[in-house]
Amino acid sequence: MIKKSRLNTSEKWYAYAMISPVVLGFLGLLSFPMAYQFYLSMTDTQLFGATSFIGLDNYKTLFFDDPVFLTSMRNSIYFTVVLVPLNITTATLLAVLINRKMPGIGIFRTLIFMPVVTPVVVWAIVWRFMLATDVGIINSFLTYFGVEGPAWLFHMRLTMPVMILNTVMKGVGLNMVIVLSGLKSIPDVYYEAARIDGSPAVKTFFRITIPLLSPTLFMVVIMTVIGALKIFANVYMLTGGGPARSTQLIMLYIYFKAFKEYQYGYAAAIGVIFFLMILCFTLIQWKLRRRFVYAED
């Protein structure tokens, strides 16, 4: 029988020590909170009073007796479906633009990226004053030309588009930088071959740039979808979910149930459904990657 040397044993414990922070972090910060939330979602837990186990009653109430939840889900899906293509298309076009060598391109790149590093609360407060009905900068500017500006944050049909555009302006700079890094990694030899063949710029963009950029775009799509679904601070500061719940998204509804009405069990059930929704979106995108993502062998 061969005995293990002390060196092998020490290396084994050294490896365990190195991976222990990741394992403990995964168990303590992810696995246990998720398991506890799932348990909490099957209880009637409030700020005051005893906790009672009620099984799947919270989920039944969500889908059959809570129209506000269904409205929040519908708003979140609409917000995501509109924002993601707009954000990624804008980021890609901006990345292609600033990838060229032009005078002043550094300043232009900085101006686009500045909203990303601006605190979201500051961003929302500034835009709330700018979009004010009576004294806002935008409506004052329109009044100067004889145009009566609308109530941007109090109009049922305008508030959601305004919210989407505001969110795109806030986060498009980050996607632009990621797409720009993908553009920098494309070898110039492909573009040289296209120029020799006399390929038009638009055809080169769709036949060379987009396929070779597809792995980067795939990652950006996943990040943007998750970010759009879990947005909270910008909506809370700008509209608070109004008017008439037209901008109430799922994260805002979780906040109201947990920290305004103190229904922690019910809020946990919404969180579980929200997690499953994000998981489904991610799995669908991952499933479609072989069709839309180009992999160079």
Image: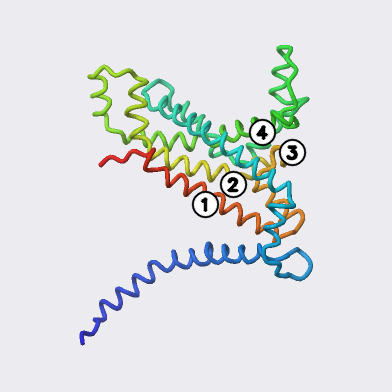
- Cα–Cα span, label 2 and label 1: 12 Å
Cβ atoms under marks 3 and 2 closer than 8 Å: no
Task: Give above or below for 241 relative to 274.
Answer: above
Residue highlighted by disc 3? 242
Query: Residue at the spot x=48%, y=30% of the render?
Result: 89
- Cα–Cα span, label 4 and label 2: 16 Å
Q: Which of marks 3 and 1 is nearer the N terminus?
A: 3
- Cα–Cα span, label 4 and label 1: 25 Å
Q: Is residue 121 visible?
A: no
Q: Which of marks 4 and 1 is nearer the N terminus?
A: 4
Query: Residue at the spot x=36%, y=35% of the render?
Result: 213
In what quadrant of the picture does the N terminus appear?
bottom left
Q: Earlier in the sequence, mark 4 or mark 3?
A: 4
- Secondary structure found at label 3: loop
Question: Is residue 24 shown left or right of residue 73?
Answer: left
Q: Which of marks 4 and 1 is in front?
A: 1
Tag 4: amino acid: Met
Label ID, residue 279: 1
Where is residue 69 drawn, in percent x and y? 70, 48
Where is residue 290 drawn, in percent x and y? 37, 43
- Secondary structure found at label 1: helix
- Secondary structure found at label 2: loop
Cβ atoms under marks 4 and 2 closer than 8 Å: no
- Secondary structure found at label 4: helix
Tag 3: amino acid: Gly
Q: Nearer the viewer, mark 2 or mark 1?
A: 1
- Cα–Cα span, label 3 and label 1: 28 Å
Number of other residues with Cα within 10 Å of mark 3, as a class: few under 14, some 14 to 19, many 20 or more: some
Frontmost residue, 244 versus 122? 244
Tag 1: amino acid: Leu
Residue highlighted by disc 2? 230
